[in-house]
Image (cartoon, helix red, strand yellow):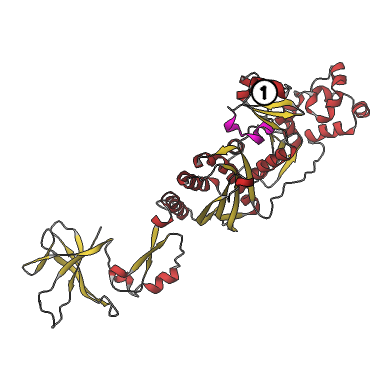
Amino acid sequence: MRLWIGLYLPQLPLEVFEPSWSSNSVTVILEREKVLTMSRGARMGGIKPAMRRGGVLMLAPDARIHERTAAREEAALQAVAMAMLQYTPQVTLADESTLLLDIGASLRLFGGIRSLCRRVRADLRGLGFTGKLSCAPTARAAWMLARVGGGRMLKQQSSERALYRLPVTVLPAARPFASWFEGIGCDTIGDLRRLPRPGLQRRCGRALLDLLDRAFGSLPEVFEWIEAPTNFKAKMELFDRIENADLLLSGAQRLVLQLIGWLCAMQLAVRGIMLKLEHERGRVARAPTEVEILLAEPVWHSDHIVRLLKERLGKLVLEAPVIGLVLQTTQLQLMEPPTESLFPEPGGTEEDQIRMIELLVARLGEDKVRQVKPVADYRPEVANTWVPIQEKVREAVIADQLPPNLSSILRPSWLLVKPIPLLVRNHRPFYGSPLRMVSGPERVEAGWWGGTAARDYWIAEGQEHALYWIYRERVSSADEDPEPRWFLHGLFG
């Protein structure tokens, strides 16, 4: 089934300068020294469309005034289009700040048209924009419905009925003839379709008929699809100087959404990103503050990346106000397919566990989260070392460091930092109660190159049926004290 989403951004000139999450401020966009659009705060202050700059400053002396910039509007539309690439590779820019998405092949992947539309709206809000969304079987019909406020028409019959009710002036080719249409009583698309085609073509030209035919599906359409760049680098200027790092998350999320669209379009996953916080330029310029995030496993979804950025920005203390953000990738790899297992892993998948570890690293710091790396030594207290969690410890290296008969060795879950000397009563070690030997002994004799250890280990049981890992120092004939000493070295769960 061929289905299109039309996404019309009516307030794009305003939101290019100040996203919708800051619309309470008094902001005005001018075009040729007259008000083109304004924020809600400016409208409440009495500012009206077409008002001149002097009138704006008289009503709101502290208003932020921007000139309309075509380049910034084009860049903003490209940013929205880049984020939409995560839903379909077929995205195109249409007339009058409108995007068209061919999502017929994506419906099952995203759970149907309702779920897909919700996700598109949520991403649009995350990007800082508001828009009108429509669905129709043809691209031009979706464009027309979006231009008049949106609507969801999934079948050709319902789409045609909705198009018949639209005003004639929704078609760009009909606007130069608006007064003539009004004079003959042709107000809607339905009225226009009932007019004789030869006469309508002589009066208004072939372009108007072609638009109608494309909207009703009787004429094919050709599009120029948006292509993702080879390398990803997204940048945005902030609406004000930000001195609190927590406030940068909304802007960073906007860049992350563009990153996710680019990753899906390129079939890549990211393992490292760099967020640069740009400061003042000119005479007081200083180098950007860099926030680098390295991922243990590649990802191509935004939620995990945004959580990590939130943790890092929450701990960051800015040395200077931030005026811009730049996001770029540092490590990429091909997108891996999902697991083929039929049933979910107990306790979460391996990806869930890795994301939890990455979240802990972002919250506590890299030096606070460590992993065990085995060392080829039979002494338990030096049989492993702690290394950063980001360090890759290969399975082959671990196997080389472990003893060959590891499967037959029982070890406690909790090894004490320092062995505890035990009392000896009636020639039996005592720890709260007399200990009874359950298994053993296991002889450990190592460290002849320094820190010699000669021990016999047992698993002992107390009267409360708890298991302990204890050892007895081996006594040589040269020792002055022939009585062996016992130590507690570990506890079993």
Report the label total: 1
Please, which residue is most extreme toward the front here? 283
* Residue 403 x/y as whole percent: 34, 74
* Residue 408 x/y as whole percent: 30, 71
Dot 1: element: helix
> Which residue is nearer to you in this view: 413 or 391?
391
Would residue 374 be seen by someone viewing this image from the given angle?
A: yes
Label 1: which residue? 57
Residue 389, by quadrant, is bottom left
- Dot 1 crowding, Cα within 10 Å, few <14, some 14–19, many 20+: some
- Looking at the picture, does residue 162 appear above or below residue 274? above
> Which residue is nearer to you in this view: 288 or 130?
288
Determine the residue positioned at 30% across, 74% down.
Answer: 378
Q: Which residues are magenta?
A: 12-23
Determine the residue positioned at 64% across, 52% down.
Answer: 232
Q: Amino acid at mark 1?
A: Leu
Check residue 382 for magenta coloring: no
Q: Where's the N terminus, which quadrant?
A: top right
